[in-house]
Image (cartoon, grey):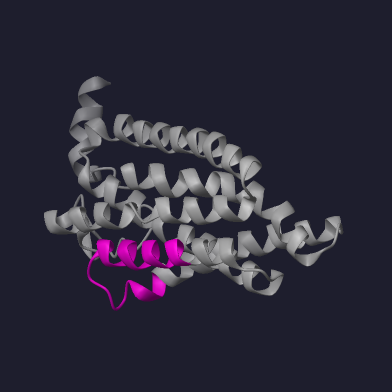
Amino acid sequence: MLASFLQLGFLSWAFYASQPYLLDLLESDAVWVVGVVAAAIALSTIVGNQVVSVASQRCGRRTTLLLIAGAVQTGAAIVLGVAGSFWIALPALLLVTAGLGVTSPVRQAYLHQLVPSEQRATVVSFDSMVSGAGGVGAQVGLGALGEARSVASAFVVGGLATAGAIPLFAAVRRIGGRADEIAGSRGGVESSCPHGLPAVATVDAVAIDELEPAIAARA
């Protein structure tokens, strides 16, 4: 959750700040460029999702994906800030957002596997609140820094802040356990669980023949 506070907090600011920033680097006021960039960001997150599907076939632990994607996001965010060229900054931005396509579903799958079904809705809601709080803080803080210094410097500072997620993921890795394993089962139904929710949406499966007596009793 603390990692999402840092990563999603930065990204909530970076998505909006990157659009005028890239136009300035391009030395253009062509609004259509912003539309193309937004579309490219959406595609990059999809690519990140597909990377998870491919990497999960060769990687046994979710934290491995989180650590690699977190390091790539941090490095790309810093490059985005120091780049003096649109053609360097744009790929760096897309690497950042592709990293989001990796970390978000893997982290959600980890939480869904870790937390018992009775507390899952509460924990997931709290996780969303923590991420939202990071977005509020980042937009205020980095926005103020961008106005006082420059948007480029805010990207560098924000990128450095996301580096704090790496030791947090490393701490989760040391915990280990089934939730960190990409291949597993839930409710007796096998699922590779590479990203997103497991095949049964992590709701404990109950066989139909076990439910029929309870339904009959209620009737």
Is 59 inside the magenta-drawn segment?
yes
Give the side of residue 80 with respect to residue 202, left or right.
right
Q: Is residue 43 above or below residue 113?
A: below
Q: Residue at x 50, y 47 (%)?
A: 10
Which SS type dominates the magenta stretch?
helix
* Residue stretch rendered in magenta on the structure: 53-75
Q: Is residue 99 above or below residue 211?
A: below
Along the line of sight, the residue nearer the viewer: 98 or 159:
159
* Residue 185 in which image quadrant: bottom left
List the single residue furthest toward the bottom.
58
Q: Residue at x 37, y 60 (%)?
A: 195
List the single residue furthest toward the top.
218
Along the line of sight, the residue nearer the viewer: 81 or 1:
81
Q: Residue at x 48, y 34 (%)?
A: 137
Q: Is residue 68 above or below residue 123?
A: below
Task: Residue 98 in the image: state x and y as whole percent.
Answer: 51, 64
Task: Residue 58 in the image: state x and y as whole percent.
Answer: 29, 78
Give the side of residue 37 with respect to residue 173, left or right.
right
List the single residue furthest toward the front.
149
Q: Residue at x 45, y 32 (%)?
A: 133
Along the line of sight, the residue nearer the viewer: 105 or 219:
105
